[in-house]
Structures are given as C-alpha cells and as structure tokens.
Image (spheres, rainbow, N blue to C red):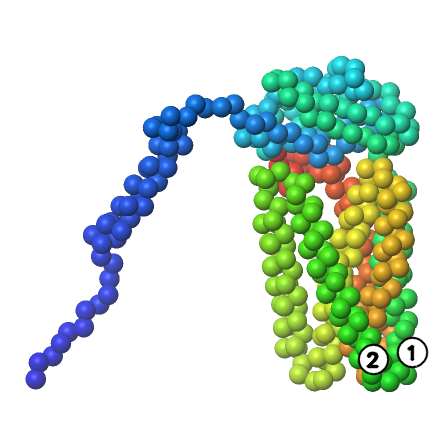
Amino acid sequence: MSTQTKRTPGIDLKAAGLFLLPILALVAVIVVFLNTATGTGLETVPPVEGLITERYSLTRGVIELEVRNTGPQPLTVSQVIINDAVWPFEASPSATIPRLGTAEIRLDYMWSRGEAYAISLLSANAIGFDVEIPVAVETPAPTPATFLGFTLIGLYVGVIPVFLGIMWFPALRRMGRRTITFLTAATVGLLLFLGVDTLFEAREASLLLPDAFQGVGLIAIGLVATVLLLEAISRRKRNASGTETSRRMAIASIIAVGIGFHNLGEGLAIGAAYNIGELALGKFLVVGFIIQNITEGLGVVSPILKERPGLKTFVILGLIAGAPAILGAWIGGYAHLLCWRFYSWRLVPVLCSR
C-alpha cells in the first residue's frame, strides 16, 4: 500500500515575482506619464489657482482673514483690495501659501459697525478671490460673558425643550395603546426625517468644500462611524441584562444618544452663525430648534412608558439628549479662533495643521 506524502503549502517566490512584475511595470508607466506626458502631444497649461476664506474675524480697527490654498501649486497673495481701494496687509506665516496650506491676512482697517465690505485678494497671477462681509460686527472672543452666552443658547435649544418633552410622560401613560402606537410611529418618522434632512444638508455643505477635502467621503465616514457607535452602545446595553426592563431602557438610551448627536450639530450651526455675525440667522435657528426639539423628549420616553423610572433616569436621559447642544455651541462659536491661536502657539500642530 503506497503512502502519499502531503506537501506543505508555502510561498512560491518565483510565482509571486511573476505576479508582481506587471504591477511594478504599471506603476513605472504611470510615473513616466505624470512626469513627462511623453507622446501626448499636449502642452502644459498653468494650473488653476484656488483660494478660499475659511473665516474672518473683526476686532477694533483690524480685519483678519484665515485663507487656505486649495489649488495644486503654491499661491502668493500679492494685493488686497477693500471696497475698491488697495490696502496694505500682513500675511502670517507667509504671503506664499503652499498647497492646502493656510495663512492669516491682517488688515489694519477702521471698519464701521453694521457696514458691508467687499474684499478681494489678488494672487501673483492677478487672479482675484472675493470675500464679502455683509454686516460688520466685532467677533466674539473667548470671554466669560460670551462663554455664558453660548451656554445659555445650548440650554434654550437642547436641554430645556427635551425636558419639556419628557414632562409628557405622565400624560402618555394615561393614553390608550393606539394613541401610544401613533405617537411612537410619529416619533420614529420624525427621527427618520431628521436623519434624511441631515444627510441632504451635509451634502449641500460638502459642495462648498474644495475638492481636495473630499466632502462626500467625510460624510460617509461620519455616517458609518455614527452607526457603529450607536450599534456598539446598543450591544453593550443588551448584553448588560436580558430583562424586558433593561431592553426598554437600552432603546431609550440609544434614542437619547442619537438625539444628542443631532443636537450637537444644531449647536454647531447656531454657534457658527453668531460667531460670523449672522445674529438674525442665529436667533431664527434658536427659535426653530426650540419648537422642534420639544418632540425629542417624546421620542426618549416612548420606549419606557410601561416602566416607572425614577427622577434620576429622566435627568440622565434628558442630559444625554439635550446637553450636547451646549458643547456644539461652544465649538461653533470658538473652534476656528482657538484652532488658529493654538497653531500659532505651536500647541496642536496636528489638529490645526497647514
């Protein structure tokens, strides 16, 4: 009886080399094309320049612009024009901005409160990039007063409406099953609407970003990360205990976390509106979000209507759902200013990288 020896699988170096050879040749072809464009018969044209103003800030007698070079080549800011008048400027760290780099343009200009200003930045190739300041107001600085102001905005927008919605809990317990089912379905529909609306708004915002930042990809990363985070919280809650009460509390906690993420975005929008001087827009957003967010408390307590949770549970759920609006208002109001200052102090070169 003949025995057949088994052959241990291993790496065939010759086969691996033959497999990699076409890939290496393909890489070589791409490198040659990008460096020489041999055989195309096309002449090299000057690259399209791009410069965006990420933020402007106004203090007494000073206008500061934070700009980013979104073009493929370094760009040099040669002139600045304010309301059709050429004005001297200072650029930090340099007037020549590398690709995807940032610079601060400082203009010593006595602006007047409430006036509109049109600013044009001219590159060395005489290409203009316009910046409009519709209403000139002093940019809020990180002071205790403005910090308290953004905190109150977060309370008005997120915390208070959510707790007012939670106060419906006793009334909901007295309602019939059909009414509860209808209100729960309405809450789920509202959450779905908010999710879809958020995606559409994110898509519109991504169109304003330079192509180099891949706005659609950032949306996808944020969406996937949020879903994974909520799923991780859900599994942890389900694995903690298998009772019916714990499952209902887990659903309420997940809904509160999801609403918290939503309120974080609302706080960001309001803080950013106040930061750039859009006071009317900021007030409009506050009133609109207050009216909308009272229904979020209903969504938080709907899964636990058959339970008798204590006051501590309601407080925790309300803070999880509403308090992120305060954090969002802080970030929206101060993020750009703090980021630039930290970078200039060389404290966080990665977060505020050029």
Q: First in sequence, mark 2 or 1: give its number.
A: 1
Residue at 72 percent across and 51 percent down: it is 201
Q: Is residue 264 left or right of residue 171?
A: left
Q: Residue farthest to the left?
A: 1
Q: Residue farthest to the front?
A: 41
Q: Is residue 101 something one can see in this rendering?
A: no
Q: Secondary structure at mark 2?
A: helix
Question: Separation of disc 2 and disc 1 at Cα?
Answer: 10 Å
Q: Is residue 76 something one can see in this rendering?
A: yes
Residue 180's disc is 2
Q: Secondary structure at mark 1?
A: helix
Q: Residues within 10 Å of mark 1 (few under 14, many from 20)?
A: few
- The amino acid type found where label 2 is placed reads Ile
Mark 1 highlights which residue? 171
221, 83: nearer the viewer = 83
Q: Quadrant of residue 114?
A: top right
- The amino acid type found where label 1 is placed reads Ala
Q: Is residue 98 left or right of residue 166?
A: left
